[in-house]
Amino acid sequence: MEIAGKSREDITEEEIEFLKESYTSMGGLLPKGFNGGAFFTPTHVAEFIWRVLAPLLPEKPKVLEPSVGSGIFLEHAPADSEITALELDEVSAKVTSLIHPQANVIQGDAILHAAENIYDVVIGNPPYGETVNIPHEGNPQFSEWVTLKRAKTKKDDQPYWRGKSEGVFIEHAIKCAKPGGYIAFVLPKGIAFNSQLKKVRELLHDNCWQIGTVLLPGETFQHVGTTIETQILIVRKVTPNARKIKSAQTKWRGLRNGAQLDDFNGEFFEGQMPAYFAKVTDIGFDKDGNKTDKWGDGLTQLDELADDFNDDLVRPNLYPHVPSWTGKGDNESFFFENMNGESEGAQDARMTYGDGPQRWNELTLGAGVEVEWNGEEYSTMDYDGYTQEEAAELLGLAGKPGVNNLVKRAVLRTAESEGFEVEARVEWNEAVFGRWREHISR
């Protein structure tokens, strides 16, 4: 491309404006919007992810985009973000650096970007179905990675570290995110059940809380000539003191088709809320690219879903359904919908939400219990607006049998927002719901 071939000082402001108008997530100046396994992301998908994440982030968040492409995720990032953007393709990196001068755009192999425990957010649409080959020589650090194996290519006899791109990028993201930081990726649907990616699911289970999984229809990437089904996965990297504990709910009955758990042995990190799932049935355009905005306001189902993601620990009116992984997968698969739309939660969501967007929760640590406080009963799913004094008093309740982790998290959240320094430890008693020991000090 002629403009990208010029030196920076020879590029005019008019040419930069041309790039901004032409180099878009809908394909732009790259043929069919496709480059080495990376499908350029529709604008409203990137905007939705940032609408979910932005309220959760600190001021001046450190952001990593490891496969920046056209830079669509940079376009909607908070204005005060400190952005590092990585891109293998030289032309894409040059153009993105011109369009987004606020970002530090680095051209090169993203996996070689060594910055562990740094970023508040790792975000993007990493390449799918590609083979990552990294020279073995000079890179001994990859011997500890679970997604890369030592191998040789057919072209030469030199050893490489090799792995599937989607798995390698997830492991890289987990390493780069700081404890408590977020990872938001657009991923192929097959990551939920592909046996070759079992270790990737285990990585997520061993390092992250699930925040939400949003299933996207095949039309999402019709602009690049594919109907591959994808999903948005949003997770949070656990803090060092977080421990896995067993679910308080060993028995549970679903709402449909006789779904029932008699010996639920799920294990999750402390503080894991019920797993949230949503299915978008209309992405805003059909397979031919025609708009499907029936109300004429430019909004899509993603705009409706954005309101589900707030600071509440449990979304209102979403019953925790029998987890889909108990029928088709293993515990580490709880991040994903595992029954191809036939799980109890997915079926109930179709009945409840009709044309969509459909959403449901799946059981993790518990289903909420009633507690008595000041002569009144309160649900552990209802915890808005505690004062400092109320938070301190509720800590006493949180140490009693029958009060699950939802109370504990609600109290800690309020205490932290009120300026307390909080240290939390959990002793789990498998015979009862659990006993929480909390300490709050100024």
Image (cartoon, grey):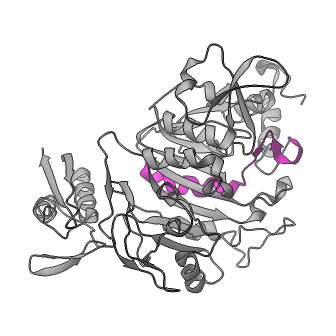
Horizontal relation, residue 305 to residue 157: left or right: left
Residue 165 % position (x, y): 68, 39
Tell me where the magenta segment starts and ends, as one range.
Answer: 30-57
Residue in the foreground of this view, choosing between 403 and 418: 403
Relative to 404, residue 156 above or below: above
Q: Is residue 273 left or right of residue 299?
A: left
Horizontal and vertical percent for residue 36? 80, 38
Q: Nearer the viewer, residue 408 or 144?
A: 144
Going by the image, does 262 lie left or right of 167? left
Q: Residue at x 58, y 42 (%)?
A: 170
Does the magenta segment cover residue 47? yes
Secondary structure mainly formed by the magenta segment: helix
Q: Is residue 108 visible?
A: no
Q: Is residue 359 visible?
A: yes
Q: Could you tell me residue 399's position as x and y percent?
A: 13, 61
Q: Residue furthest front?
A: 263
Q: Residue 181 appears in which quarter of the rendering?
A: top left
| Residue at x 15% of width, y 67% of height | 401
Query: Which quarter of the rendering shows the C terminus?
Result: top left
Instruction: State the residue at coordinates (27%, 56%).
Output: 413
Reply yes or no: does residue 132 show up in magenta.
Answer: no
Image vertical order of residue 163 relative to residue 373, above or below? above
Image coords of residue 283 (percent x, y): 71, 67
